[in-house]
Image (cartoon, rainbow, N blue to C red):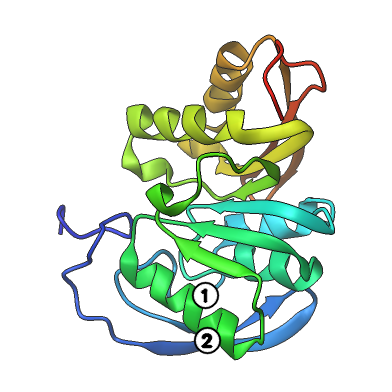
Amino acid sequence: MASDHYFSTAPASPEKLRRIRVPIAGRDVTLSTAGGTFSPDRLDVGTAVLLGSTPAPPADGDLLDLGCGWGPIALTMATLSPAATVWAVDVNERALGLVRRNAEELGLHNVRAVTADQVPSEIRFRTIWSNPPIRVGKNELHGLLETWIPRLEASADAWLVVQRNLGSDSLQRWLATVFDPGYTVQRAATGKGYRVLKVHKRAASQGEAA
């Protein structure tokens, strides 16, 4: 089992495609999930807390769902912001296939389900929403956030949901230390044992281009 997680590139477990009913942008829809992906049987509680606690995404520009799984966050952003391009990024090829399938079924043509290396390096994001893969380990997680948070546009926000007993408070302290100066980090919401952390990139972030 150790070699087959939701953060595996190519899960070895049977796909076992299934259909589940979930709320997306205030509407109940039926979507496809599969084994070897994150929370295939239901909308994860942390994801639900994030979606219920985060302001509406920007109406246009490039938006990022980091660690998208089968796509509830990306699909929500794409529904709420049809003029935006939503980048759904994951290492799990099975999950990315499900995002594409679900986006097509919902008629969403503004979702790009890709691996990290397929996101053009010049793109900067107007927001990042993420239920990050905590179980990849601290070093991997920190490297992930250090890679993507600096790609926010100036004055943009990243919203991260983390379970309290999986280290949300220590992650908040780490974020505040690593992304200082140039950013502010705060706990924006709590619910059902989860924290929603907001990382705001200031307008003047040491001369870095937006």
* Residue 76 falls left or right of residue 140: right
Coordinates of residue 46 in the picture (x, y in percent): 59, 55
**Residue depicted at x 54% and y 82%:** 102
Q: Secondary structure at mark 1?
A: loop
* Residue 68 falls left or right of residue 137: right
Q: Quick one: quadrant of the C terminus?
A: top right
Occupied quadrant, residue 124: top right
Q: How would you rate the neighbour count of disc 2 (Cα within 10 Å): few for under 14, some for 14-19, many for 20 or more?
A: few
Mark 1 — residue? 42
**Residue depicted at x 62% and y 63%:** 73
Coordinates of residue 137 in the picture (x, y in percent): 33, 35
Front residue of 155/139: it is: 155
Mark 2 vs mark 1, CA separation in Å: 7 Å
Residue 27: mark in rendering: none
Occupied quadrant, residue 202: top right
Q: How many numbered badges does the structure rendering display?
A: 2
Coordinates of residue 61 in the picture (x, y in percent): 75, 53
Mark 2 — residue? 20
**Which amino acid, mark 1?**
Arg
Q: Is there any visible trace of residue 41 in the rendered image?
A: no
Q: Secondary structure at mark 2?
A: strand
Q: Give the mark, 2 or 1, whose residue is nearer the N terminus.
A: 2
**Which amino acid, mark 2?**
Ile
Query: Quick check: marks 2 and 1 in contact, CB under 8 Å?
Result: yes
